[in-house]
Image: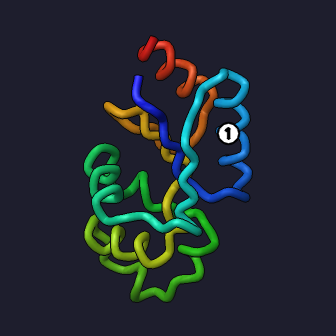
Amino acid sequence: MSALTLYGIKNCDTMKKARKWLDEQGQTYHFHDYKTAGIDQAHLEQWCNEHGWEKILNRAGTTFRKLDDASKADLDQAKAITLMLAQPAMIKRPVLDLGERTLVAFKPELYAAAFADLA
């Protein structure tokens, strides 16, 4: 299996849970902090095409809620990607790149099932 990459923000509580779970399972992974290292449009497009931009854009977060109404209006994939590129904190986290597919958000049972499928 190729190296895993975990995308997210270092200090996020959900990220800490995902990292702890991966560590406890003995999974080796690279951590990409998109708040400090950024994220490129190609990754966002891939994730949105795989899961739908509605799942990738974190509308529940403070960063999105603080946007003006014009920025929140008439959202589509292109506009969502533009917002996430400008403010990576709006990207749902974590995103775990398994190589063939990605997992968005962290639920221990989903991670366990995905790793069982890879075995």
**Image quarter in which the C terminus is found:** top left
Occupied quadrant, residue 97: top left
Occupied quadrant, residue 27: top right
Foreground pick, 72 / 47: 47
**Image quarter in which the N terminus is found:** top left
Q: What scheme was used to colour the molecule?
A: rainbow
The percent coordinates of residue 13 (x first, y second) are 73, 51
The percent coordinates of residue 59 (x first, y second) are 51, 65
Placement of 82 over or under 58, stated as above or below: below
Q: Is residue 10 left or right of residue 113?
A: right
Q: Residue at x 49, y 61 (%)?
A: 91
Local secondary structure at mark 1: helix
Q: Residue at x 73, y 35 (%)?
A: 20
Say what amino acid the circle numbered 1 marks.
Answer: Arg
- For mark 1, what is the residue? 19
Q: Is residue 78 left or right of residue 73?
A: left
Placement of 29 over or under 42, stated as above or below: above
The percent coordinates of residue 31 (x first, y second) are 58, 48
Q: Residue at x 69, y 30 (%)?
A: 23
Occupied quadrant, residue 25: top right
